[in-house]
Image: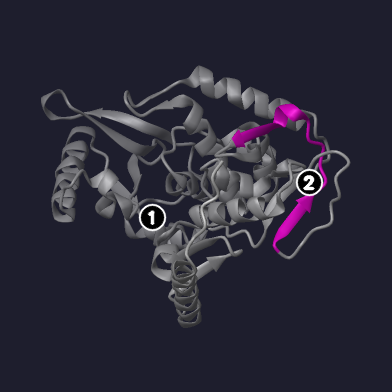
Amino acid sequence: MTLEIMPADLQASEQFAREQARFEVRQRLARGTLVRLHGQWELTAQEYASLYAEERHRIEVASIARAMRTDVAVVSYASAVAVHGLPLFRTRPRRVHVTMRAGAATRSHPAVFRHRDSLPEEDVASVGGLAVTSLERTVVDAIRVLRLEAALAVADAALHRVAWDDSTRQYDEYAADRMLMRLWQRLFRMPGARGIRQARWVLELADGRADGPGESVGRLYLLLLGFARPRLQVAVPGPNGSVYRMDAALDDVGVWWEFDGIGKYLDPGMTGGRDPSEILERQRRRQEWVTATTGWPFARCQWAHLESLTAFALKLQADEVPLPRAHVLPL
C-alpha cells in the first residue's frame, strides 16, 4: 500500500477553499437564504419552502436518525406516516417520533419524542434505510392520535396504495377488505387504548378510492354535514367511447362533487405539458357533457374550502347544493 503525501501548498489551498465555502454557508444562513437541518442537510430557503410538509419532515427524520446512530429507536406515529409517503393533512410534527424497542431508554429530547409502546419485530420495516413501523402499524398508531381529518386521509391513502391500480383505474376491493380486516384485528387487541374510539370511526369511513387528502377531507365534511355516504370514482360514459370519472356522487341530492387541487393545473406530472387554460377548457367541456347526459350539476371545492367545516358548507351553498337538516356524526 502506498501512502500519498499531498504537497503543503496544495493542502493549504484546499483548506482555504473549504474554509471559504464554510464562511459563505454561514453568511447565507445568517441572511436566511439557507436552511441547516441538524448539521447534515443544507437547502436553500426557497428549495425548503417549496417542499410539502411531509417532505420536510422526512428530511428531519433522516437527519435525526443519522445523528442518533442507534437501532433501538424505530420511527413511528406521524414521522412514520411521512416516511411511508402518506399524507399529513395540515399536520406539522414539532419533533421526530420514535418508538423504542424493548428495554431501551425512553427519555425524550427537544428534537425527538420517544414512545414506550409494545413493538413486536413484525411491526418493524425498513423504508429508505430507516427502521420504521410497518404500514399497518403506522396506520393504526396515526388514526388514534392525529386530528380526525388527518387520520382519515392517512387511512384512505394506505388503502389506496394497496388496492388502487393507476394503470387500469380499478379498485381491488378484496385487497382493501383484507387490509381493513387486519387493521380491525389490531384495534380489537387494543381495548381502552388512547384514541381507540376515533380509530373505529376512521376505519368505518375509510375508502381507498379517494385520490388524495383533499378528497378524503371533503368526503368527511360531507358526512359530517349529514349527506349519505357518497360513491367514489364513479365512471360516466363520455363521447366516442371515452369514460369520465367523477370524484364523488351525492346520490341523496343528485350532485357531482369534485375536489380541484392546485397541482391539477400546475404540476407537470399531472398537466402533461398542457397549459392551464387548456386544462380549464377541457374541464368545462367535460362538465357540460356529464351534466347534459346525467342531469346532475357540479359542486367543486379547493383547498381554501377545506379550512373548516363552515367554509366547506358555505361553498356548497354557493354551488346551490341543498344541505341536510341532520348530522350523521357528532361535530
- Give the percent coordinates (x, y) of residue 319: 32, 55
Q: Which residues are magenta?
A: 111-126
Question: Badge 2 local density, few (<14 within 10 Å), some, or many (20+)?
Answer: few
Q: Is residue 320 visible?
A: no
Q: Which mark is residue 194?
A: 2
Asked if the magenta segment contains residue 125, the reply would be yes
* Disc number for residue 316: 1
Neighbourhood count class around disc 1 (C-alpha, 10 Å): few under 14, some 14–19, many 20 upward: many
Q: Position of residue 268 (x, y in %)?
A: 25, 49
- What amino acid is labelled 1 in the image? Leu
* Residue 71 x/y as whole percent: 74, 41
Point 51% across, 77% down: residue: 26
Instruction: Say which residue appears at 15% left-offset and 53% top-offset.
Output: 275
Residue 85 is at least partly visible in this image: yes
Query: In this rendering, would 150 be left or right of 167?
Result: right
* The N terminus, quarter of image: top right
Q: Does residue 277 lie above or below 154 as drawn?
A: below
What residue is drawn where x is 64% and y is 23%? 181
Question: Which one is in front, 111 or 179?
Answer: 111
Q: Nearer the viewer, residue 244 or 25?
A: 25
Question: Could you say which quadrant of the image residue 24 lies in?
Answer: bottom left
